[in-house]
Amino acid sequence: MMKQTYRVATVLKPGERKGSCWDLLLLKSDERRVRRRRLELVHGDFVLVDFPEPVTLDQGYTLVLENGWQVEVMAAEEELFEIRGRDRVHLMQLCWHLGNRHVPAQITEEWEGLGLRVLIRRDHVLKAMLLGLGATVTEISEPFGPLEGAYHSHGDTNHVLRNT
């Protein structure tokens, strides 16, 4: 069967979708910020996104196609380092060192009650620095949702890049 390309008409934020999805779009963190691109769906077809401004397609967003079908956006698993500090102050110090190097990072509290942690993409140089600073660094694989830079808006419509 020949693969089809479907055009995206609109984007819905988590909780706005009505009904079930026809397919899934699995994207890594660095693939979720798009303006105009053809993206492959899990079952082999494609969607064409063509937005007037860049949009961040976060976990749980829904693409509504021109034919009304819906596609759920899912964050793909990535190879990451999980970083933990001795305490909250130490973890803040570790975050400062990562931020000083402009490293994309996700700061999260684990649901199992194990406390705060920071996730970054695996990088042996950063691992050596963090270990030298007394961090606990563990290799993991899970979806990655780093914070966007300070110049991006999470405003009313679709995570559009703010032009300031």
Image (spheres, helix red, strand yellow):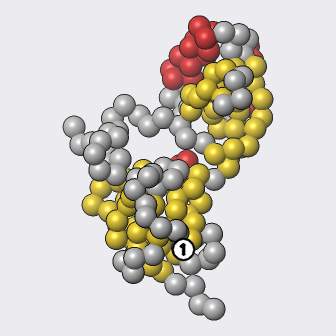
Q: Please say if 54 is above or below 105.
A: below
Q: Is residue 53 rendered to the left or right of residue 73?
A: left
Residue farthest to the bottom, as pictured: 1
Quarter occupied by the N terminus: bottom right
Quarter occupied by the C terminus: top left
> What residue lies at 52% left-to-right and 59% top-to-bottom?
73
Nearest the viewer among 163 and 88 is 88
> What residue lies at 34% left-to-right and 52% top-to-bottom?
158
- Residue 152 visible somewhere in the drawing: yes
Q: Position of residue 29 (x, y in %)?
A: 55, 47
Nearest the viewer among 157 and 98 is 157
Q: Is residue 8 rendered to the left or right of residue 163?
A: right
Element carrying mark 1:
loop
**Residue density around tag 1, few if under 14, some if 14–19, many if 20 or more, within 10 Å:** few
Q: Amino acid at mark 1?
A: Trp
Q: Please say if 123 is above or below 17.
A: above
Q: Please say if 130 is above or below 121.
A: above
Q: Please say if 11 is above or below 66.
A: above
Q: Position of residue 61 (x, y in %)?
A: 46, 55
- Image quadrant assignment for residue 150: top left
